[in-house]
Amino acid sequence: MAPGDTAWLLVSASLVLLMTPGLAFFYGGMTRSKSVLNMMMMSFGAIGVVGVVYVLWGYSMSFGTDAFGEGTAGIWGDPFEFWALNGLLPGTDEADPYALSNSLLTGIPAIVVVGFQMTFAIITVALISGSIADRVKFSTWLVFTGAWVSLVYFGLAHMVWGGGLLSGDGPFGSMFTDIAPIDFAGGTVVHINAGVAGLVLALIIGKRRGFGKEPMRPHNLTLVMLGAGLLWFGWFGFNAGSAGAADGLAGLAWVNTTVATAAAMIGWLIVERLRDGHATSLGAASGVVAGLVAITPAAGALSPVGSIFLGLIAGALCALAVSLKFKLGYDDSLDVVGVHLVGGLVGTVLIGLFATETGLFYGGGIGQLVVQILVALVAIVFSGVLTLIIGLILKVTMGWRVTADDEVEGIDITQHGESAYDLDPTASGSGASGVLANATKKQGAQA
C-alpha cells in the first residue's frame, strides 16, 4: 500500500466530481432564466447515468483487455472482464487484499482508481450539454448519455489510457524512436471528444428559435463566475491527480495548471478589449475554462514557462473561435466547440512544440508534433462518426426537440414543472418570494 498516494487520489476523485456541479453553475448562469434548471439537470443527469454504467461495464470497457482479443484494433476493452467490478474489490485478491494486482497504479487499490476514472467519464458527458441548451428533451438526453459514454467515451479512454490504438503501445507509439502520444489528463479523451460531440449534436438538433435574431444573453453572470471558480478548484484533482501519486509530477501539474489558466484568462481579455472595447466577466470566466482545457493534456509534459505561453495562445484562439458559430451558422449554445474542441486541440497539438523532453522548441525534432496531430485527428473522426450515428438514431426514435410552444415557454416549466426564480411581486409568504413581495410593497408605500 501507498497510503499517501491513495489518499491523494481519493481527494482528487472528490475534486473532479465537484467539477460537474461546478459546470452546472457555469452553464446554468450562461443560459436564459427560463432554462437554467434544465441546464443544471443535464449535468446532474450525467452523474446519475454514468455513475451506474461505469461500475457495471464502463471501467472494464476502458481498461480491460482488447474486446476482440489481444493485438486487435484496441478500440474498446472487454466489457465483461471486470463486469460490476468483478475482481477489483478489496479482499478479492488472496495474495494482497489491499493493493490489488489489477490496479493500474502501483500501491493504490483498484477500487480507488475506479472512482477516480469514473469522475472523468461523468464530466465529459456533462460538457456536451452546453452545445444543445434550451431545446432538447431531458429523456432523450439521458438515453444519449448512456449510449454515448459506452460507445464513444469508453472507446477513446481505452485507446488512449488503456493500451489501445492511440496509446504508446499502439501504432502511433512506434512511428518515431522514443516518441509516444501524450495525453496527460484528457485532451483527446475528454475535451476534443466532448467538443466534437457537441458540434455534431448542434448540427443534428438545429438552432434555438430566434438564434441570431434576438438576444440570448447569460441570465446570471454571478453563477457563471462561481461555476468557473469551482471548475478551477476541481481541475487540480483532474490534472494533478492524474500524476497518480503525491509527488513532484503532481506538483508540476498543479503549477502548470495554475499559470496556464491565469495566462489564458489574460489572453482572452486582451482579445475582448481589442475587439469589443471591454474586458468582461464572462470573458474572464471563459478564459479560465479555456486555459484549464488546454493545459489538461500537457500538464505533466511542459515547464511552467511553456505553460504560460500555451495558456496565452489558447485563451486568445478560443476567444476568437467562439464567434465562428455566428459566421458558420451553427448554434453551439454555450461555446462547447469554441472552448473545449479548440482548447483541446491547442493543448494536444502544441505539446509537440512545448514538451520539455520531446518538443520541437526543446530540440526534440518534429516527431512529437506529428504524432500529436495524428492522434487528435483520429479522436475527431472517431467521436464525430459515432456521435452522428447515435444522434441520428435518437432523432428518429425518440426525437430530440421539445415543441415550439414548450421552447418559447421555457423548458424548466415544460420538462421539469419547476421555475428557477419565483419572483412574483404579488406573492406572499415567508420564503424568498415573500421577502421580495414585502419589500416591493414597502417601497410602494414610501413612494
Image (cartoon, grey):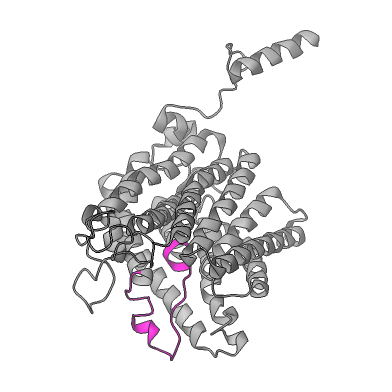
Residue 18, how many percent across, how many down?
Answer: 50, 47
**Observer-nearest of 261 and 406:** 261
**Observer-nearest of 119 and 196:** 119
Residue 384, how many percent across, how many down?
Answer: 38, 65
Does the stretch in magenta take in 180? yes
Residue 180, how many percent across, how many down?
Answer: 43, 82
The part of the chain drawn in magenta is 162-191
Which quarter shows the C terminus?
A: top right
Residue in the image at 61% along x and 13% along y: 426
Asked if residue 272 shows in the view, the reply is yes
Which quarter shows the N terminus?
A: bottom left
Side (left or right) of 53 relative to 107: left
Residue 242, how many percent across, how many down?
Answer: 47, 64
Residue in the image at 61% along x and 40% along y: 223
Q: Which secondary structure class fits the magenta region best?
A: loop
Can you tell which quarter of the image residue 138 is in? Answer: top left
